Image (cartoon, rainbow, N blue to C red):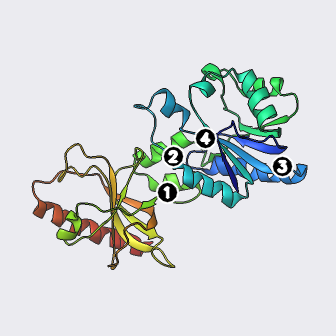
Amino acid sequence: MLVQRGLSGATARPVALTIGNFDGVHRGHQAMLNRLIEAADDLDLPPAVLTFDPHPREYFSPESAPPRLSILRAKLDAFRAFGVAVTYVARFDARLASLEPEAFVTDVLERTLGAQWVLVGDDFRFGRKRRGDLALLRSTARTMSVEGMATVLVDGERVSSTAVREALAAGDLDRATALLGRPYTLSGRVAHGEKLGRSLGFPTANIPLRHKAALAGIFAVRVHGLGPAPRAGAASLGVRPTVAQGARPVLEVFVFDFDQTIYGKRITVEFVQKLRDEARYPDLDALTRQIEADVAQARAVLASR
């Protein structure tokens, strides 16, 4: 898959295109990608995606922007798996935010990207002050056809990134899995930590988080990337209130029955079940006893599944 960062260097080529943030690449997004591939095949056009980084809400209000469900790399991996040929990653900045919607259609979609067929969600908004919508896109388009994607429902609920975030924040991983079509995961490279877990008898793989996480607490997890099969473990995602003050969130994973040096290795953590919220303990002995209980519970949960 060709990844084109920025629009200034894009070479206009006839493409079938879908547009969106695709945060989490949930089942609604997956339906869009399937429809894109189908239409591109019918029209004999390369299937292409236009997405944005950072998320527009991170640009307009970084302090109150919602947590990201997926980093850009994870989205690109998903697009590649679906068979997308080209992904345009547009930087969302002042210029793009101030672009009139009509100019976005004619200058960006038609002239710069060469879109001949475009698919968007039925709630798609674009252009200055979010004035553009599906109706305006259709009325402005001159050299491309436009299709709106119908809402995808799961158990009567509209699938959206917001719904996934709500499920994760509530610790309802089964609901999140249903909306995503797969278990929720976070990936990253293992970094050196303070080695406190090792001193307590529970060495952890530490994954720094660049963005605010959509969930927090103690979890039963499966860890991918340490061998041919996933490994069982327990994870803490949060600010470690017992041992740190004002710390940035970190994902710490204790992999069961595993003792290898994996610093710098990229792993993926699959969240299976939330065990509890983070808590502050009076001393390290109390924390150690709680970790022992968490590990026992996580083992039982994973064995039952």
Local SS, label 3? helix
Local SS, label 2? helix
Q: Position of residue 156 (x, y in %)?
A: 61, 44
* Horizontal relation, residue 56 to residue 230: left or right: right
Comes first in the chain, label 1 or label 4: 4
- Report which residue position mark 3 lands on: 39
Query: Residue at horizontal 47%, vertical 78%?
Result: 227
Asked if residue 132 is positioned above or below residue 10 in the image, the reply reads: above
Comes first in the chain, label 3 or label 2: 3
Q: Residues within 10 Å of mark 2 (few under 14, many from 20)?
A: many
Comes first in the chain, label 4 or label 2: 4
User: Which label sits in the foreground, 4 or 2?
Assistant: 4
**Amino acid type, callout 4:** Asn
Q: Position of residue 20 (x, y in %)?
A: 65, 39
Comes first in the chain, label 1 or label 2: 2
Local SS, label 1? loop
**Amino acid type, callout 1:** Tyr
Whether residue 218 is visible to the viewer of this picture, yes or no, is no
Q: Position of residue 264 (x, y in %)?
A: 40, 66
**Are circles 1 and 2 on residues that touch, CB within 8 Å?**
yes
Picture disc at residue 21? 4
Query: Residue at horizontal 30%, vertical 68%?
Result: 297
3D distance between C-alphas at marks 3 and 2:
28 Å
Picture disc at residue 222? none
Work out whether residue 298 or residue 61 is closer to the camera in this orientation and state it. Answer: 61
